[in-house]
Amino acid sequence: MTTDALQNWEKKTKEHRKSYQQFLKRADKNKVLKQLPVLHEEAFEAVDCLTCARCCKNYSPRFKTPDVKRIARGLGLKESVFIDTYLKVDEDGDFVVKQSPCPFLNPDNTCSIYEMRPSDCARFPYTDEDVLIKRPALTLKNSEFCPITYYVLEKLIAGALK
Ligand code: SF4
Ligand code: SF4
């Protein structure tokens, strides 16, 4: 983590959970959406995902039908073989990885299927989408372990207080 804005973020994100909750409940969606592209970019510059990989180590993306088709094809596997080898169905009925860390995570934290990774992985942590506001429970959960989510929430709240 290369910036002062991220100092003690793990401690602070716990302490600030209530204010995140309140902010997400009351936030002006249009105003937030205008701020997100810049904050999203800033956050990805400040945080090196390759030294983190907490998402890939601890949580699974959903593997939607187009993801399964694309990845199975890319790996040269039959869809049924790909599913049997790597995936299970979770409580919401979605395909997810059988176990964490993700089997496609390399030891250096790069992704072995990066170019064809699931759409959830490409979009995570949704800091440039309205999902950030529309799914507050998800955003709060992500703020617990993802410094990019923390960074964006902190900046949004600081901007709203001005
Ligand atoms: S948890 Fe957040 S900061 Fe860490 S690798 Fe995933 S997206 Fe990047
Ligand atoms: S598919 Fe790649 S980006 Fe997605 S969780 Fe697995 S290792 Fe991470």
Image (cartoon, rainbow, N blue to C red):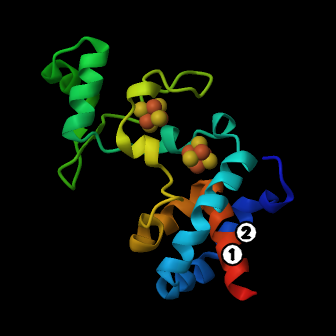
> In the image as oriented, which residue stretches furthest toward the right?
4
Q: Which residue is mark 2?
A: 12
Residue drawn at x 64%, y 40% as measured from the top left:
49
Q: Quadrant of residue 89?
A: top left
Question: What amino acid type should be assigned to the residue bearing mark 2?
Answer: Lys
Q: Which residue is the site of mark 1?
A: 15
- Name the residue: 43% across, 41% down: 121
Element type at mark 2: helix
Tell whether 112 sits left or right of 8.
left
Q: Is residue 101 visible?
A: no
Of all residues shown, which one is farthest toward the top? 76
- Give yes or no for contact between labels 2 and 1 (Cβ–Cβ under 8 Å): yes
In-image side of 11 versus 130 (left or right): right
Residue shown at 21%/56% (left/top)? 92
If the image is split into quadrants, where does the C terminus sit? bottom right
Residue 148: percent from left, percent from top: 63, 55
Q: Position of residue 155 (x, y in %)?
A: 70, 70
Amino acid type, mark 1: Glu
- For disc 2, the neighbor class at 10 Å (few under 14, some 14 to 19, many from 20) is some
47 relative to 72, above or below: below
Badge 1: residue crowd in 10 Å (few <14, some 14–19, many ≥20): few
Say if 69 sits above or below 66 in the image.
above
In the figure, 53 relative to 94: above or below?
A: above
Mark 2 → mark 1, Cα distance in angstroms: 5 Å
Tell me which image quadrant ligand 2 sits in: top left
Local SS, label 1: helix
